[in-house]
Amino acid sequence: DTGSVDWGEDENVDRGNWSSRYDFLISCLGYSVGIGNVWRFPYLVYKSGGGAFFIPYLLMLVLCGIPLFYMEVAFGQFASLGPITIWKVCPIFKGVGIASVVSVGLVAVYYNVMNSWSVYFFFASLTSELPWKHCNNTWNTPTFKLVCERSIENVSSETNCVNVTANMSKPVYTSPSEEYFFNEVMGLSGDVGSVTKLQWHLSLCLLLCWISVFVALIRGVKSAGKVVYVTVTFPYIILLVLFIRYATLDSSAYLDGIRYYVTPNWQRLASAEVWADAASQLFFSLGLSQGGLIAMSSYNRFHYDVYRDAYVVCIVDTLTSTFAGFVIFAILGVMADEAGTEVENVISSKFTLAYVAYPEAVTKLPAAFAWSLLFFLMLFTLAVDSVFFMCEAIVVALMDEFNETLAKRRIWIIAILCITFYLLGLPMVTNGGLYLVVLMDQYAAAWAPLIIGLCMCLSLSWVYKADHFVSNIHAMLGSRPGKWWIVMWKYLTPLSLLFILVFSWIQYAAPTLEGVYEYKYPAWAHALAVLVGISSIIFIPRCHSFYIMKSQRFKEKSRPGYGWGPALHKHRVSAYIPGIINSEEETKISRTAQWVAKGSV
């Protein structure tokens, strides 16, 4: 009966299920809505010259985002398996599952490093006066102090500052919050190779972040499903307060920032970088092709209406990013007015936009330290939610793949995982750590998820067959997805991803870190970053070669493997499953799908 779902006892006793009909929805929002919405989306809009970014982003949302999100959550719910073991559906593509797990691990490492910045700002806010409110501090550069003092005498403003550096053709406008972030928080050196001096304050903050993730993982998804009710709604309150505050200032300068935000620079649409950034941000924000959605949906009850949730999560995530953009560009408009410059020049390093603009914003609020505490607590909870589900995807993948060995060792797996990721993150909290974070964001979180998504789409819609997948969804939801979904999964989505990848590779430009001077990475840094980027997708062709060499029969390993299908016997009886390959010998079946009799294969 697909018309109702029993929310009493767990349907799958061995694996467990979400406790209520809204736990999965809210958890998906907690996984998707994170610092990527309040940091990465506005940063990429700023980098792309304003509103032009919306066009490729919304186009990618329709062509790739919603179809892939629906595909992943339906895929995980049907089989109730982790992101690696679920590839019993097509064993030759098992490398896609391994690649997604490695990819989400890389993202989790640097994602929590950025979360450590929020933790440090939180503790720095435990004072009656915020330390980045003034510019006459030990971490400010001498030229910055000098010009700031002159500005205070002439304009009576402590934020109307200009950092004049020797041999510069024009001055670069900065703010106390920007100097605080680069000089005090990051202790930034002048080169990516300077990773020898550990920033102890950040390393301790990073340790706290991973301890929080460890505790959350031990408690499991049932507890996390309750906590995210608070952590998902909290950001909207803080962002709304900041927006109202800046919209009610005496100056209407906030409108200049919003105007920049919504006005497209049409020439930027000819840049492959803008299209690639839009696609990577969509995958980054929604968590596509990283195993998290498959892991979370594997805890769903078999007949849960996952179709509805796919739309809700994608739309709410996009609206959250858009609203966060309005808030941060309103702040930039006021900052530009105080600095006497244009919006596009007010912050020298666009990558660190959120960690400069938001601290600056809270200084305009009454009881600024209290609002600063709430804001950075919000960023911390947003990031912990996302990292929790990233790591849960890895834990679920390992537990399902090595069930007999690891069945009773979940705590040890979690402990080893968190310790390993903490150690991998330590180079990113050194005095050259920011350079590494930029490279990780450009390489680990950009191309790999798109390639994994392309392979997933092709394997399910062409090798496994889209008609079979549609029949699986029919068994769960009681209705067949329309032809529109088949067209998207077979043609439009993979072609869109292929276009973005080829277009961006043709017009490839090496990433830089903007600042007072634009920092260009040495060749060895790019080479190392490329190796990190391909460390996940390398598993896709390796598994193909393994299965072809092992069996010398591509067709055999392209068919569903033994055990593919719903987890429970009562659902296997009515599930539409194509022919199964027995673990010892190939069962003689036709190419068309067959009803599995009495749940046996």
Image (tube, rainbow, N blue to C red):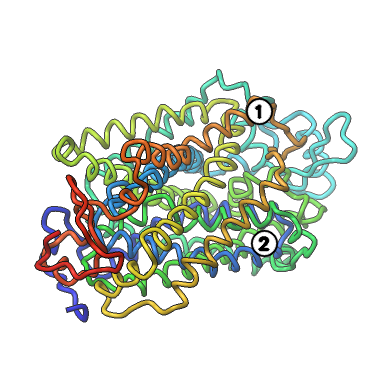
Residue 173: image quadrant is top right
Q: Residue at x 65, y 68 (%)?
A: 247
Task: Tell me: residue 224, above or below residue 191.
Answer: below
Q: Residue at x 44, y 42 (%)?
A: 540
Asked whether 333 or 467 is in front, the reply is 467
Label 1, on which residue?
Answer: 138
Label 2, on which residue?
Answer: 53
Total marks drawn?
2
Label 1 vs label 2: CA separation? 39 Å
Which tag is nearer the camera, tag 1 or tag 2? 2
- x, y (%) of residue 211? 32, 37
Residue 73: image quadrant is bottom left
Q: Residue at x 69, y 27 (%)?
A: 522
Amino acid, disc 2: Phe
Describe residue 51's horizontal placement relative to residue 455 as left or right.
right
Describe residue 210's horizontal placement relative to residue 367 as left or right.
left
State whether residue 553 appears in this view.
Answer: yes
Image quarter in which the C terminus is found: bottom left
Q: Tell me which label, 1 or 2, sits earlier in the chain.
A: 2
